[in-house]
């Protein structure tokens, strides 16, 4: 959430160091990367840079976590790799009533849980009803069911959802369906992170078979997956805090895939290009890279908390800061051309919803205009050229920065220079875990970003007033404590609009409103730059199929379709082997065995699917 780390801003990240070759085996007695000669399992290893916040589909919000859960549990519908249209998942068909308030889904009769029990409509009804009635169970995806009035399962193959108001996301409910016979035994959804007994019962292409904090998440192929089992035997996600080390591991053949943090840096990608048996995939991304401004942290009960700088409550100050940002320079010098300049909230990859400000609305690079706005707002310079706050003290903003993301540090240096020319000081707070200050509202600005789904509802929902925590002690679903009546009205209208073109127009108005408020300033849309070993992976699906990315895509297509280099397969997913993917580019996990946050953690630019 979307994909909002996406809500990484900080928190848990399993750093997974992948197994050495595609023939390595992982057993419960051996950590990933160590093989036993008598076994001949096909292992796909991947290095990523983010921590797991939870392996519970009710709690997980970070990209790595939601990606793993997407491999474990089916949704009602999937996104087609070709054009992202809705295609059957657990539901083979769906139909709305004439008033669009009742939706009936036909649940497939040929799908089984990994323990052999049949998947029925009752599993889906129980999942949704639990999210509707248990606050903790709605932590990750509660926005999808907030408008649900009643959910029933009249038969094993019929699911009926009654809505309070029309809801345009009914063919894009990105909610993992869980087995009722397993999860109904859970007493506290806020404390259960799905890391108890292995293997974990699921319905997706992979089954969770092992987890060790700060080490790995291990999955094996699900032979009962209704589409057919993957061609790799195991899939392992493992932690590399040092992204350069992960790249070196790929070069040596110790991992099969590296996604980066969440993307490889230009220097890392360049170091891999031309290397034998290595392919670099550089595609338009589904993420935005932004500056989030503390709008004055608040709870749903109206109580304020945190200590954001009061000057940032002035829209003129927020606009001035962004006017000083040279987005072209960031694209050219930091991303070295592997990105495009940002503006709206939805990346250009999603052309239906992509929005750009009009020339008279755009906050184009204008340092002189920025200085004038600060003068108009009453923040004058002292004799040394420093801008003074209303308290007479020089203004220095605290900028939350992810210690594992080299882009944050590089962009931060430019901001120090550009804002310094305005007389404003900047203190980069680069932390391994930015979750705590973010949740507490003890920051001024922060690097932010989400992965966006083909349907953008989730990343839009996290800026509504309803997403605020109920009290300062709660966490809520909010990204940045934004609460604006005009935005809320537009959000409700787009959610209720079934006409695709009219809805797209409302989504663009939402982005325009966010842009004008100035609390979320999108600087760039980074490319998805990743690399894999062709001597371990013969073929792998991207999404979109033409010029798409592999890791963190809109579904499980990459890992399900991947064919081992020695299989001679076409990557159609019809094989009987399973996948082990070690995700190693920077998962920061909570210390201690099995340690997870019992509350929702901040997500990073790469957090949400």
Image (cartoon, helix red, strand yellow):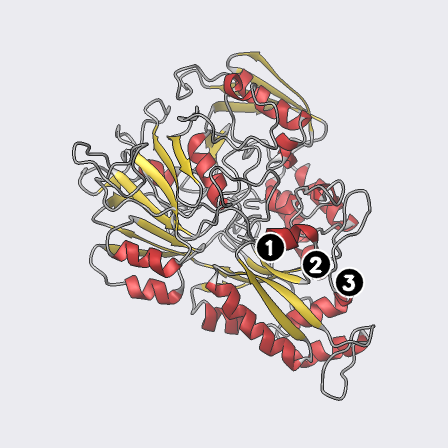
* Real-space CA distance between mark 3 and mark 2, rounded to the nearest whole angstrom: 8 Å
Query: Quadrant location of residue 472?
Result: top right
Give the mark nearer the N terminus: 1 vs 3. Answer: 3
Is there a contact, CB below 8 Å, between mark 3 and mark 2? no
- Is disc 1 placed on a helix, strand or loop? loop
Residue found at x 80% / y 51%: 304
Residue found at x 26% / y 44%: 539
- Can you name the residue that lies furthest to the bottom here? 383
| Circle 1 or circle 3, nearest the eye | 3
Residue found at x 60% / y 25%: 128
- Is disc 3 placed on a helix, strand or loop? helix
In percent of width and height, residue 544 lies at 41, 46
In percent of width and height, residue 444 lies at 68, 63
Q: Is residue 40 visible?
A: yes
Depth check, front residue: 279 or 607: 607
In percent of width and height, residue 23 lies at 21, 39
Query: Quadrant location of residue 396?
Result: bottom right
Disc 1: which residue: 345
- Is disc 2 placed on a helix, strand or loop? loop
Report the side of 402 relative to 224 (left or right).
Answer: right
Disc 2: which residue: 294
- Can you name the residue that lies furthest to the front here? 592
Residue 313's disc is 3
């Amino acid at each position: 959430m979307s994909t909002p780390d996406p809500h990484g801003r900080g928190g848990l990240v399993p750093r997974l160091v992948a197994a050495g070759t595609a023939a390595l085996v992982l057993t419960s007695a051996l950590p990933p990367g160590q093989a036993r000669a008598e076994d001949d399992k096909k292992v796909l290893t991947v290095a990523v840079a983010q921590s797991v916040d939870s392996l519970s589909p009710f709690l997980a919000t970070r990209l790595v976590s939601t990606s793993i859960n997407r491999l474990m549990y089916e949704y009602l519908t999937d996104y087609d790799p070709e054009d992202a249209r809705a295609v059957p998942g657990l539901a083979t068909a769906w139909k709305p009533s004439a008033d669009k308030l009742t939706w009936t889904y036909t649940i497939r009769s040929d799908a089984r849980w990994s323990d052999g029990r049949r998947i029925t409509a009752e599993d889906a009804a129980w999942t949704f009803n639990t999210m509707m009635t248990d606050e903790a169970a709605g932590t990750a995806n509660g926005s999808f069911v907030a408008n649900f009035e009643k959910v029933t399962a009249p038969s094993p193959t019929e699911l009926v959802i009654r809505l309070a108001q029309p809801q345009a996301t009914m063919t894009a409910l990105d909610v993992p369906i869980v087995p009722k016979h397993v999860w109904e035994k859970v007493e506290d959804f806020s404390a259960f992170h799905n890391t108890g007994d292995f293997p974990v019962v699921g319905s997706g292409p992979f089954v969770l078979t092992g987890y060790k904090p700060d080490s790995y998440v291990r999955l094996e192929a699900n032979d009962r997956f209704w589409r057919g089992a993957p061609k790799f035997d195991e899939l392992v996600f493992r932690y590399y805090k040092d992204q350069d080390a992960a790249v070196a591991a790929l070069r040596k053949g110790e991992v099969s895939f590296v996604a980066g943090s969440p993307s490889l840096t230009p220097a890392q990608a360049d170091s891999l290009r031309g290397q034998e048996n290595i392919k670099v995939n550089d595609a338009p991304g589904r993420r935005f890279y932004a500056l989030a401004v503390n709008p004055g942290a608040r709870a749903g009960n109206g109580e304020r908390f945190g200590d954001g700088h009061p000057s940032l409550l002035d829209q003129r100050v927020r606009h001035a800061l962004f006017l000083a940002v040279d987005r072209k320079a960031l694209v050219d010098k930091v991303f070295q051309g592997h990105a495009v300049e940002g503006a709206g909230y939805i990346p250009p990859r999603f052309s239906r919803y992509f929005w750009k400000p009009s020339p008279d609305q755009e906050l184009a690079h204008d340092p002189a205009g920025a200085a004038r706005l600060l003068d108009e707002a009453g923040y004058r310079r002292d004799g040394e050229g420093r801008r003074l706050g209303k308290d007479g003290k020089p203004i220095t903003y605290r900028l939350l920065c992810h210690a594992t993301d080299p882009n944050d540090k590089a962009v931060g240096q430019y901001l120090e220079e550009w804002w310094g020319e305005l007389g404003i000081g900047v203190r980069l707070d680069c932390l391994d875990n930015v979750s705590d200050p973010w949740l507490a509202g003890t920051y001024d600005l922060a690097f932010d970003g989400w992965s966006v789904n083909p349907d953008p509802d989730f990343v839009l929902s996290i800026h509504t007033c309803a997403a605020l925590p109920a009290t300062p002690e709660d966490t809520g679903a909010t990204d940045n404590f934004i609460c604006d009546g005009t935005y809320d009205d537009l959000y409700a209208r787009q959610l209720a609009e079934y006409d695709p073109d009219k809805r797209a127009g409302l989504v663009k108005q939402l982005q325009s409103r966010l842009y004008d408020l100035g609390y979320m300033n999108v600087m760039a849309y980074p490319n998805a730059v990743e690399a894999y070993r062709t001597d371990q992976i013969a073929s792998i699906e991207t999404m979109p199929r033409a010029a798409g990315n592999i890791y963190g895509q809109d579904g499980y297509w990459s890992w399900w379709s991947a064919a081992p280099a020695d299989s001679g397969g076409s990557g159609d997913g019809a094989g009987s082997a399973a996948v082990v993917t070690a995700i190693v580019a920077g998962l920061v996990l909570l210390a201690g065995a099995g340690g997870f946050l019992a509350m929702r953690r901040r997500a990073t630019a790469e957090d949400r699917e």
